[in-house]
Structures are given as C-alpha cells and as structure tokens.
Amino acid sequence: MASSTDPADNTPVIIGIGQYSERVDEPGYEALSYMDLGGRALAEAIADTQASGSVAGAIDTVAAIRAFEMSRPGKEPPFGASDNPPRSFAARVGADPERAILSTTGGQYNQYLVGEFATEIAAGRSACAAIVGAEAISTVLALSAKGEKPDWSEKVGGQLEDRGYGLDGMMEPALFAHGASGAIPLYAIAENTRRAKLGMSLDEYRREIGELFAPFSRVAANNPHAAAPTERSAEDLATVTDRNRIVAEPYARMTVARDQVNQAAAIIIASVAKARELGIPESRWVHIHAVTSATELELSERPDLSACPASIASMERALDIAGKGIDDIDHLDFYSCFAIPVFNQIDHFGLSAKDSRGLTLTGGLPFFGGAGNNYSAHAICEAVQRVRDEPESYALVGANGGWMSKYATGIYSAQPADWKGTQRVTELPKATDGVPRSTEPAPRATIESYTINHARNGSDAIFIGRDPDGNRVVGNAAMSHAPTRKAFESGEPFGRTLSLERDERGRNIGRVE
C-alpha cells in the first residue's frame, strides 16, 4: 500500500532515457538512417528503465521530432524518409502506439512535448509516452560525397498527427530577401547588438565568445556522443584562421552550431501507476517540476535586437513553479546554438561564464553538436542522469527554437513533484509591444545592428535600422561604395545614417551619408 508521502498514481515521471550516435569512419560506423538511429535511441531508453514488464507494449503515444531536412516546405531528405516517422521508431522496438505525432520545427519543441505529455498523463489521458528524434546529416553528406544514395524511404502508414512546420514568427520575408535567410546571419545581428552595447571591438567580442565556449568544449571532449570531442582554448575559438574563418561577423566557424551530426535521443514518460506496474525501480524515476514555454516577437520588431525577454520569462516562471532560484539549481544546460542565447541568460541572472556548475551538460551545440530540432532531448537525457546520480539535486534545461523565437524551460529532479495542487506546465502569453516596421520606401535609416554574411555565393552586409519615423528598416549596405564598405568592415557602423534606394529586386540599398 502506498504511503501518504508517495506521489499520486497519475504523477508523471521520466522513466527512461536513451542516446545513440556514430561518427563517420570511426570503428563500428554503420551509416545508419534517421529511423535506425532513432530506433536505437528508443531501445536504449527502454533498457534504461530497468523494467521487469514490457515498456514497449505500454507505450500509447510516440512523438517524432521533425528532422532538420524535413523542417521547411519543399525541403526533402535526399535519401527519402518514412511516411510515418513515429511509427517507424515504434516498430523498431515492437511498440504499437494508439497515437503517433510528428512535431513542428523548433529546438524548443522536445521540451514542450515533455510538458504536454506530462499533462496528458496527469489528466489520465495517457499512461506512457515516448519522444524520439534523430539526425543523420553527417552520414548524408559523407555518402553523397561518394556518390552513394541509399534508399531510406519507408511506407508504414497508420494514424499520424502531423503538426506541420510551425514556422509562424520565424519566416521574415524582408530579412530573407536581403540575404539573412538562415540562423547564422540572424543570430549575428543579435550578437552585434550586444557587442555595441558593451562597446567591444570585433576581436574583443570574439574573445568574449571564446571565454564562454571554451568550457563547453571541455565538456564535449568527455562526452562519448559528442560530434566534435576536442577541447578548445578561448584563444583557439577567438583567433581567425583559414580553418576558423569568419562565417558572419562576429562569428568564427568553431563558435556556431555544428549541424553535421549523427545523433539520436529518446525520452519515455509514464504515470507512477504505470511505472510501478512495469516494475521500474523508483531510483529510475525523475520528476518533472516545471515546463514553461514562451514565444518571442519576430526579430525585426524586437525593441532590443539582442534580447529575448520571452526566454527570460520562461526561465523565471519555471523557477517560480519549482520554488527555486537559479542558485538552487545544481545542473544547467543553456541552449547554445550561438553565444547570444547563453549570454541572454547569464547576463540576466548575473552568472559568470566560468560558473562552477558549468553552463552545459552535453558540451553545447558547437561541440557536442546541433542535432537539428532534437538537441535539447540530449540535454534532458543528461539532466536526468545527473539528478539520478545526485538525488537531492535539481537540473534546468533551456531549449530554444528559431532565432530566439520560441523557448521552453524544464526543471527536473529525483525529488517528488506534487501535481495535485500545482500547475506545473504553462505557456506564457506572447508580447505585443513590437517596434513597427516600415511598409513604404524610406529615404534613410540609422543603423542599429548588422552583420557581414559570408555565404557560398558571396558576401552581403545586412543591417537593421530605424527610418526617420522610428520604424524598423531592413537593408543591404552598398559595399561597392568605399565609405560604406569602410564603415561596415571596421565593425563600427552603429549609429551611422544611410541614404536608401530600392534596387530592381525591391531591396533597400544603403550608402553612408
């Protein structure tokens, strides 16, 4: 008979975690598909439960995290894919869930699903759910380079709840039209805004990024699943070389998310009643103390281009729900696709880049690897293991999607969480106080931030500024104009006024006045 201090039967707990990875040309490399990698991770998660009963037979819901190569309309995996990824994962472990879900795009979504499934379990609508994600970009590139094209397509059929791409708030036509069409230049614009506020030169700021990320690389060097397990010094990361070239000011190549990975992770959540029925030892249970999510304004309408108040609100609310302060958290993983999401958190909480707890559990996206939309599942797996090893401890994972567009925070511990009287999962309202954006051609603009993006098809200087009425304007600098080129290449164009003209493609082209 359960005692009065035992968690209620419908309390959700994480019962199993699994990670699987391989590196090209290393011993044992199998060139596994997305589905095979994810299946291996799910099998690891089932084994991790130490159950005496059939966990696979108990799983009623499986969600697949949308792979990176399936995350935009018209973008198809080069070797094909399953028509029902969650059921492909499930079939590899002998599971036949009632419900199969394909997630939206966004690195926050796996943690969002932890909260969603925990809520479903607490309400009695589910008893055991799994979240699985996998990326095989490194293998795709390696095989393509050799002219090989295996068939990874699978016809599975069956029920599927496809939640779509979920790109609302992330696709900004004005920025894309001016060459800021991917994560690197968009984050670089945010990063340069912070640099301007700090009054740092490009070299000084690259050193700041190096100081932040050197400890991350140390963690990755000791993680068997890391894609780049090599420790780097701050000087290594900050010094520009042919190997560590500038990809977009101020970023050197080794300090941006590494998407060439073969990694998969799985998380299994169940009710306490189901965990007991399956014979899962309580030492495997990890309680979900809070999951909060928030959506940010689009980049070009944010009052402070370097800030993400939604992520701060998510963090603060999660800590409040868990009844903890940041100093009470023993294990931290701040999403680190680039430096600016980490800086946002440590600036707000007054933390040092050299915080003794460390700021990553995996090694971070530049070194562990940026497993598409699934990175934070790996962070959650690491968090679960840490709090199992130290049952009195608490872990916090911050998960970021888009260009600091969406955020989800999770707090975990082996200590029980009472779900009866507390709403432990919440979605915060989106801010509505955005800066208006110019809808008409503007005669001039004052530069707030910029980047020089070095892409395969050439380099573009992209800026965001304000027109004379205070509206936001996006444009390209006329780098053929010597004074303009000098202002941008100096790294200090902030506050300069540009005269604007529209080119034949409708882009704003700015020249220093």
Image: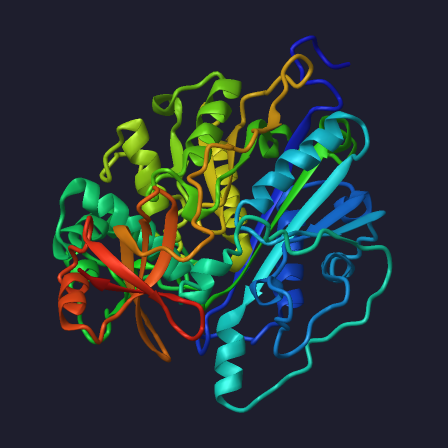
Q: Quadrant of the N terminus?
A: top right
Q: What's the coloring here?
A: rainbow
Nearest the viewer among 421 and 284 is: 421
- The answer to whether residue 39 is left or right of residue 108 is right
Is residue 367 visible in the rendered structure shown here?
no
The residue most toward the bottom is 147
- The answer to whether residue 482 is left or right of residue 288 is left
Q: Residue at x 68, y 36 (%)?
A: 116
Nearest the viewer among 18 and 141 is: 141
Relative height, residue 370 to residue 17 (above, below): below
Q: Position of residue 63 (x, y in %)?
A: 70, 50
Q: Residue at x 13, y 57 (%)?
A: 203
Nearest the viewer among 85 and 362 is: 85
Q: Position of residue 139 (x, y in %)?
A: 52, 75
Nearest the viewer among 50 and 399 is: 399
Is residue 223 visible in the rendered structure shown here?
yes
Relative height, residue 356 to residue 44 (above, below): above
Q: Position of residue 441 (x, y in %)?
A: 40, 58
